[in-house]
Amino acid sequence: MQRATGIGGIFIKSKDPKALSAWYRDHLGFDVTDWGGAIFHWGGPDSAPGMTIWSLFDMGTDKMDPSPAPFMLNLRVADLDALLAALRTEGCNVLGDSESSEFGKFGWVIDPEGNKVELWEPPSGQ
């Protein structure tokens, strides 16, 4: 079974998301969108099209809970349901049920150091 296929996103807590977004825009050339994040498109003749999202969240967000870490890694996966089943069988700390939306399917696991990892199966064709 194929597991992680790439990095889907990097989500970071920030004391001042607007100011930090501006810093990344001004100094690293991030194309910061109206919603405050940046999308890095990739793919080419020998690989599937895709994207990696970089996004900041206010320090008060609960998006990374129950992890105390100020970040969350989002990993692209090929088959979320199969991977979550395998992780449960392997004794990993899988959080709750998966969720589906127009953006794909999402599930979460806590790594051995308490970091929350979001697993993302993109919609077909992405």
Image (cartoon, helix red, strand yellow):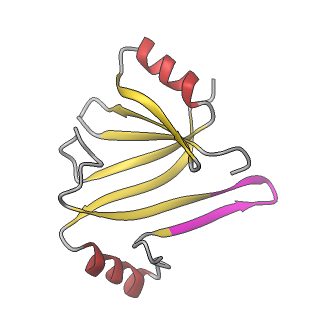
Quadrant location, the N terminus: top right
- Residue 100 placed where, x, y %? 53, 39
Q: Is residue 118 left or right of residue 86?
A: left
Residue 124 falls in image quadrant: top right
Residue 19 falls in image quadrant: bottom left
- Residue 23 placed where, x, y %? 32, 82
**Front one among 27 and 40:** 40
Q: Is residue 71 left or right of residue 52?
A: left
Give the number of callouts: 0
Figure check: 3 above or below 51? above
Figure check: 35 above or below 97? below
Identify the residue at horizontal 55%, vertical 25% (top origin).
81
Residue furthest to the bottom in view is: 26
- Would you say the magenta stretch is mainly helix, strand or loop? strand
Figure check: 116 above or below 17? above
Identify the residue at horizontal 31%, vertical 40% (top origin).
116
Q: Is residue 22 left or right of residue 119?
A: left
- The span picked out in magenta is 39-50
- Assess whether residue 45 is covered by the magenta stretch: yes
- Assess whether residue 91 is covered by the magenta stretch: no
Residue furthest to the right in view is: 45
- Residue 95 placed where, x, y %? 34, 28
**Front one among 1 and 67:** 67
**Front one among 108 and 35:** 35
